[in-house]
């Protein structure tokens, strides 16, 4: 026999059977493993497709509903009871998923299961509260102490020079803090701080009172409100400053209007005045100048994702009112004639929450009814959230409504 010839050894019948069985078992395992991979891929594709479909249907409202269900539970329910001491001076805001309650005697942060994260003793006669992304500013109207907080408690405490007073303290996106305050020898002083407390911008006003200030969403500019008199009537000037160069880049005059509240959305400035609503751009273009005429301002909401709302009444007190929403170009989106008492309104994300005397209704930006909660008890306030849920607030407790 040739030594180069390959030698083959015959296996016993039992060994051949075992080898064949192992081969088949390996093939079956391979088939099962392949099937599992195929099934996993299919499930991932179905999930991705579901997200795409839910996002595109009705401008993503189904996806928002799914997100709310995953976070809080079934739709149409009320959940998450918060409790606190009752006081007419209480101020409320959502700091993330937690309810921040500022009373004359305490600052409380409450979880949605009723857990008190902290309860800080303070002494405030007229609390003022402003919330950013992860931080909040609390001060006393006309007081000289300012508290900066996050979910862990007080980050820092600020005080005015010479025991003078703060006018306003506003948190914005990115947790930029704009502070207006009294200063000896000047009519007002304005400062901007970043989230770490570092001073980014400051100026002292010699010639005009600065009643309010807010940092834009991108953190690049400051909008300050200057109070003036023009042709014998009050006028407000919106002064725009570039924070990096500390130079004034714009100025818009609102004639016959005292700015009561201000909001910046992108490059749009929404100014709620005693006699008119104004929407202008940072570049100085006026998009809406809406005088109230003979109507009375009853309520408003400036913080919708891309809209605002105005509630005007024929009488200074009474229930005959018109609720109108506007987009950020000044175009009216929807209008409702109301004869039912409105206790509060709040806008966030795509929805406007309107709290009536015995019910809560969530409307879309064009005032189509989206969801309703009957029997709101003694609730007097509402906070709309970006998630599409609403926090209903009574004197000593609050709860979340899941539409």
Image (cartoon, rainbow, N blue to C red):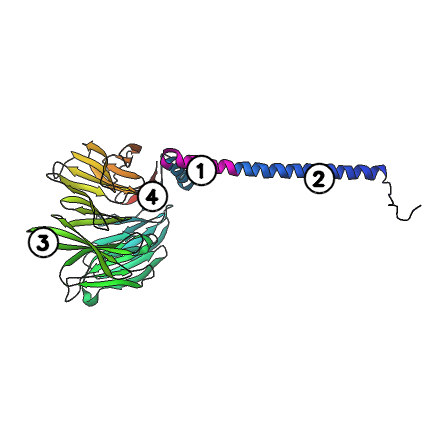
State which mark lies toward you, 3 or 4: 3
Q: Residue 26: give its label.
A: 2
Q: CA distance from mark 3 to mark 2?
A: 89 Å
| Left or right for 139, reference 399 | left
Does the magenta stretch mainly form a helix, a strand or a loop?
A: helix
Residue density around tag 3, few if under 14, some if 14–19, many if 20 or more, within 10 Å: few
**Marked residue nearer the N-terminal end (2 or 1):** 2
Q: Earlier in the sequence, mark 3 or mark 2?
A: 2
Q: Residue drawn 70% across and 37% down?
A: 27
The answer to whether residue 105 is seen in the rendering is: no
Q: Quadrant of residue 149?
A: bottom left
| Dot 2 alpha-carbon crowd within 10 angstroms: few under 14, some 14 to 19, many 20 or more | few
Disc 4: which residue:
386
Q: Is residue 160 above or below residue 111?
A: below
Q: Position of residue 74 (x, y in %)?
A: 40, 35
Q: Position of residue 383 (x, y in %)?
A: 29, 43
Q: Nearer the viewer, residue 336 or 95?
A: 336
Label 4: few (<14), some (14–19) or many (≥20) C-alpha neighbours in 10 Å:
some
Residue 229: assigned label:
3
Q: Earlier in the sequence, mark 2 or mark 4?
A: 2
Local secondary structure at mark 4: loop
The N terminus - image quarter: top right
Indicate which disc, 3 or 1, sits on the residue closer to the N terminus. 1
């Amino acid at each position: 026999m040739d030594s180069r010839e390959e030698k083959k050894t015959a296996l016993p019948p039992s060994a051949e059977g075992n080898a064949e069985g192992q081969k088949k078992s390996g093939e079956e395992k391979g088939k099962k493993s392949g099937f599992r991979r195929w099934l996993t891929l299919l499930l991932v594709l179905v999930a991705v497709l579901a997200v795409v479909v839910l996002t595109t249907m009705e401008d993503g409202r189904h996806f928002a509903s799914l997100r709310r269900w995953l976070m809080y539970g079934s739709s149409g329910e009320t959940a998450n009871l918060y409790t606190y001491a009752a006081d007419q001076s209480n101020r409320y805001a959502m700091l993330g998923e937690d309810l921040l309650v500022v009373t004359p005697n305490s600052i409380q942060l409450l979880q949605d299961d009723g857990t008190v994260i902290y309860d800080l003793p303070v002494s405030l006669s007229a609390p003022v509260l402003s919330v950013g992304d992860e931080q909040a500013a609390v001060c006393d109207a006309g007081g000289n102490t300012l508290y900066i907080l996050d979910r862990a408690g007080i980050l820092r405490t600020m005080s005015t020079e010479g025991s003078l007073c703060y006018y306003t303290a506003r948190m914005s996106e990115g947790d930029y803090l704009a502070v207006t305050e009294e200063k000896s020898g000047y009519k007002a002083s304005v400062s901007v701080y970043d989230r770490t407390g570092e001073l980014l911008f400051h100026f002292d006003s010699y010639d005009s009172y600065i009643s309010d200030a807010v940092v834009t969403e991108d953190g690049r500019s400051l909008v300050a409100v200057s109070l003036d008199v023009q042709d014998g009537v009050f006028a407000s000037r919106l002064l725009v400053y570039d924070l990096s160069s500390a130079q004034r880049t714009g100025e818009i005059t609102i004639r016959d209007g005292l700015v009561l509240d201000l909001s910046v959305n992108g490059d749009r400035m929404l100014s709620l005045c005693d006699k008119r609503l104004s929407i202008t751009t940072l570049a100085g273009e006026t998009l809406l100048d809406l005088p109230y005429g003979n109507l009375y301002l009853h309520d408003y909401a400036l913080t919708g994702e891309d809209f605002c709302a105005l509630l005007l009444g024929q009488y200074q007190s009474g229930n005959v009112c018109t609720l109108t929403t506007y987009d950020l170009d000044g175009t009216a989106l929807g209008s409702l004639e109301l004869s039912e008492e409105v206790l509060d309104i709040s806008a966030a994300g795509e929805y406007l929450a309107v709290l009536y005397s015995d019910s809560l209704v969530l409307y879309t930006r064009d005032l189509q009814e989206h969801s309703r909660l009957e029997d709101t008890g003694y609730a007097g306030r509402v906070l709309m959230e970006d998630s599409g849920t609403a926090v209903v607030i009574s004197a000593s407790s609050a709860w979340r409504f899941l539409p």
